[in-house]
Image (tube, helix red, strand yellow):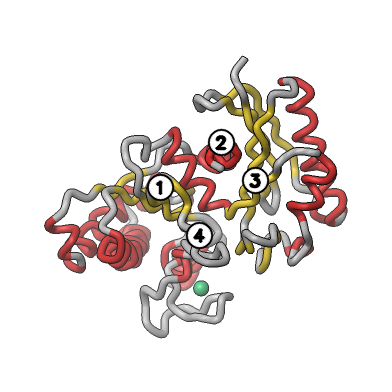
Amino acid sequence: MSEYSIGVDLGGTNLRAAAIDDQGTMLDKIAGSTHLKAGRDAVVSDIVQAIETLRGRLGPRMAGVGVGVPGFILMDQGVIVGSNNLPEFNHYPIRDEIERRLGAKFILENDANAAALGEKWMGAGREVNDLVLLTLGTGVGGGIITGGRVLHGHVGMAGELGHMTVVPNGNPCGCGNAGCLEKHASATAISSMAKLIGLGGDLTSEDVFNLAEKGDSRARAIFESVGEALGIAIATLINVFNFPLYLLSGGPLPAWDYFAPAMLAEIDRRSFTYRNAPTRVDRATLGNEAGLYGAAYLPFSK
Ligand SMILES: [Zn+2]
């Protein structure tokens, strides 16, 4: 049997782990809940146990473990900072603690960076070495892959694309800025806009999509607004990077036909590079498996 690694996706509500071999074949997968209320030590034990379970099933030829977590990562120190979902892990030496318990290499990565790496390895980005992924969820995550590797910046905080300003003095954001992309194009933003214009108080982005499908002009206008915000951000990314591929993933993706025309028109209007260089803006293909593939790829890529 070829060597395998384990990818872990640690979210605010779910803990998933998968064993994947070096050819990208998923060998085994387990999913559970993140027991945040039980405290940090319980979560660490859950992570270790998930890894041990897979290692017990697949044997000792494990290359290492990669984990995608929501939040900023200080790569050198192996700590998470500023994660809204995992506040108890702020500055806790999670990498060293888990490495100590496992006796195996454990690599931390931001969840959106891991998803971008997964799309590069086994998803929509297989044919290119340079791409950007935007994940539309509670916020907007971003990952930049260049030369086949995650662009980290000097401490590991690069690729926070959800906090690019797309509306000067727009909606206030928890990061301290106003008008961030994630305040105008996330699933949460779609719900907020639906409430603001009186479409409904508790609509999810999926509900708004269903209304758009039924021809509701206000629901469609929300997606046009999302498309414009995404277009402004992606035009800037294209102008900065001149990469061949920009991918979108996340819950609002089924509404592609409602937001993509406005998005592409905005990109075309704002980017000379887009108009003159072959550039693809497209849907990611791995869905929420992307983070598992990317996390599992980390031990192979070091
Ligand atoms: Zn922000």
In the rendering, at what x and y percent does residue 239 appear? 25, 65
Q: Tag 1 or tag 3, which sits nearer the N-term?
A: 3
Q: Tag 1 or tag 4, which sits nearer the N-term?
A: 4
The residue nearer to you, when weighing 257 against 297, is 297
In the rendering, at what x and y percent does residue 88 appear? 79, 63
- Dots 4, 3 in contact, CB < 8 A: no
Q: Is residue 228 visible?
A: no
Which of the 4 quarters of the picture holds residue 87? bottom right
- For the residue marked with disc 4, what is the amino acid? His
Residue at 36% across, 73% down: 166
Give the CA separation, mark 4 to mark 2: 17 Å
Residue at 29% across, 53% down: 243
Q: Tag 2 or tag 3, which sits nearer the N-term?
A: 3
The residue nearer to you, when weighing 69 against 231, is 69
Give the CA separation, mark 2 to mark 1: 30 Å
- Dots 2, 1 in contact, CB < 8 A: no
Secondary structure of the residue carrying numbered label 4:
loop
Name the residue that disc number 2 marks.
300
